[in-house]
Image (spheres, rainbow, N blue to C red):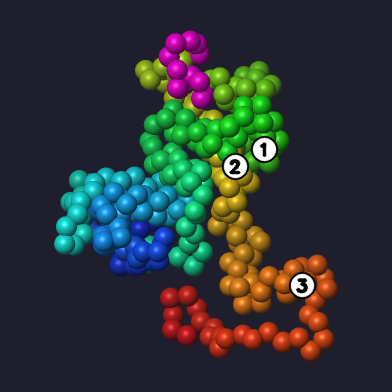
Amino acid sequence: MNVDTSCPWPVHPQSADFGGHRIWVIPLTLEEHPGVAVRCSLSLNRDEAARLLYRFLSVLAWREQHGIAVAHQSGGGRPHMVGLNRKYGFSICESFDFTELICPEDEDTRIALALMREARSLNHYGYAFLSFWRVLELAFPVPRRRVTWMEKALPRLTGHGVAEALDSIRVDGEQDVSRHLFESGRCAVAHAGKKPIVNPDGPSDARRLYRELPLVREMAVLAIEERFGISTPQTEYRKHLYELRGWKGLLGADLIQRLVSGEGVRSAEEVDLPEIHVRLRKSPP
């Protein structure tokens, strides 16, 4: 799969284990699109391979917090990357950090991450708004529970553009922000049978959706964290999950529970740890 993305993309090949298969990251070059690839086998036909790559891109887009759109698909004896039709606008990095790479098994979680990747990839504010809103509908299928959660979530939102969006809505005299977002955003984009309607020719509609997009985007992120249990990199860093996760498997659930409760290690208790090497990431042990 050739991708078109605003995500900083590596300039060196990489690979990662994902869903029981080895995924290859194809670097960005001056002449060709970047992308991802997987080797098909007797246990992985073409459709299953495509589904696996889409899921990988959705997880990667969540971790990198960028949209990743698929520009072209192909197959054959080796990955074929299509030529670039533009020379600028790409960002590069040395490599992705796959230390905390997840592979969700729950189908709703997979769909939520896919919708986030799609929404972040769209350059149309209205359709991006609608894709973010679909995450909220997936997380809270019952409208009344969704509204209740939104009312509690709005004051907790952070991120670029959130405060400005809330201020602009209240300046316009709207007191019920969640209702305003539903009627003037979600419904106005999805339907054309009743007003309000988002007019593609109306610059004021485009400006308003652009201004209010951070609210529904950050609510979608929060919903994925709270309803589906998928932490953002910022949450992992704040809770030190990236430091603790590897030790939990070594120490065992029983000892972990006692450490958290304050009981601690029992007298003469020993933990059998493997030989441990300390290194900087991307460097030898």
Image quadrant in which you'd find residue 148: top right
- Amino acid type of disc 3? Leu
Q: Single out the mark in the foreground, 1 or 2.
A: 2
Q: Helix, strand or loop at disc 2?
A: helix
Q: Single out the mark in the foreground, 3 or 2.
A: 3
Residue at 57 percent across and 45 percent down: it is 224
Say left or right for 226 vs 111.
right
In the displayed structure, would residue 210 be above or below residue 25? Answer: above
Residue labelled with disc 3: 259
Q: Which residues are magenta?
A: 185-196
Residue 3 at x, y percent in the picture? 30, 50
The crowding category of the residue bearing disc 1, from other C-alpha atoms within 10 Å (few below 14, some 14 to 19, many at least 20), is some
Q: CA distance from mark 3 to mark 2?
A: 30 Å
Q: Mark 1 vs mark 2: which is more N-terminal?
A: 1
Residue at 66 percent across and 26 percent down: it is 144
In the orientation shown, which residue stands out farthest toward the top? 194
Residue labelled with disc 2: 223
Residue 226 at x, y percent in the picture? 63, 46
Q: Mark 1 vs mark 3: which is more N-terminal?
A: 1
- Amino acid type of disc 2? Ala
